[in-house]
Image (cartoon, grey):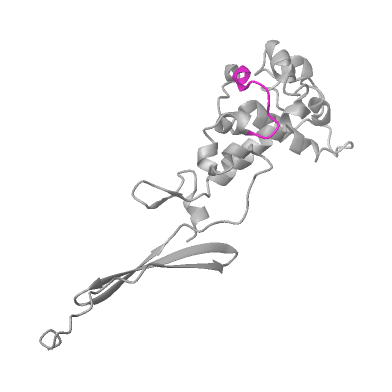
Amino acid sequence: DGEEMGMAKKPHTAPAPVKVEKVKEGLLVRTSTVSTGTSTGDVRVKRRHMPVTMFNIDGMLKQEIRRAGFHELLEHRLNVFQGFDQDPISLEAYGIECIADLATWEPYLLAQALCTAAEAESPHPTHTKPYYNVHRAFEARYESCTLKDMLDLPVTSLVAFGERAERDLAQFGIISIRDLGTWKYAKWASAIYALSVYEKVRTRTGRASTDSRLSTSSQGV
């Protein structure tokens, strides 16, 4: 009827997308609504984006790498760390090419465990029979040491290292087993490795993937 009276119908235009930002449980959650006009009515599709966390680890990383996620960081060399100015190639002889390698490096994990155990060592044990030992880690001449004594031993006292390690590791400030077990960059690598297990990452299909290291018991029942 409107056309017969010389009145043209207004063309239907789809409403512009509406973006909403809200804070939910400490996380900034971005949502967007897309409206599509059709002859039968509007179809509204809601898309939920990955939550944006409010924490950072900028104190660990150089500025140019701070936008990387935990999984991506694991593949980078150690010189992405703040203050790490040495040539990381010198560590390749020990199987360390990236952050993931350092986080899972057996000599560091051993030294870290010794540092932790030494904190619980009593100077006055209630028994005289030796119940514990780590003989497989040390040369025979160091087997009678206490845990606290072990921490002050040179890193070359570990069977995993030869004499060359004394020179190679010294450039990173690692002289003793204590130095190795408390090495800042190894602790940072270990933290990134552990946190990456709980990081949600998007696949090419847009789905959030779950790290295979995350046990089913950690995902809830």
Give the residues in magenta: 81-91
Query: Relative to residue 178, is residue 54 drawn left or right?
Result: left
The location of residue 154, given as percent across then percent down, is 78, 19
Q: Left or right of 221: which side holds 101? A: right
Q: Is residue 87 magenta?
A: yes
The extreme right residue here reads: 124
Residue most toward the front?
A: 6
Given the current orientation, which residue lies at the most extreme top position?
A: 163
In which quarter of the view is residue 39 placed?
Answer: bottom left
In the rendered image, the vertical position of residue 157 relative to residue 150, given as above or below:
above
| Residue 129 among magenta residues | no
Q: What main secondary structure does the magenta stretch of the protein show?
A: loop
Q: Quadrant of the N terminus?
A: bottom left
Occupied quadrant, residue 184 = top right
Residue sitting at 35 percent across and 46 percent down? 204
- Pinpoint residue 175: horizontal percent, then vertical percent: 77, 21
Give the number of callouts: 0
On screen, residue 32 above or below 219: below
Side (left or right) of 92 relative to 17: right
Can residue 20 be seen in the rendering of this structure? yes
- The residue closer to the viewer here, 91 or 17, is 17
Q: x, y percentage for residue 16?
A: 36, 68
* Residue pictured at 67% horizontal, 29% vertical: 108
- Taking the spot 59% from the left edge, 37% from the top edge, the residue there is 64
> Which residue is found at the position 79% from the left and 30% from the top?
147
* Residue 139 seen in render: no
Q: Position of residue 63 (x, y in %)?
A: 62, 39
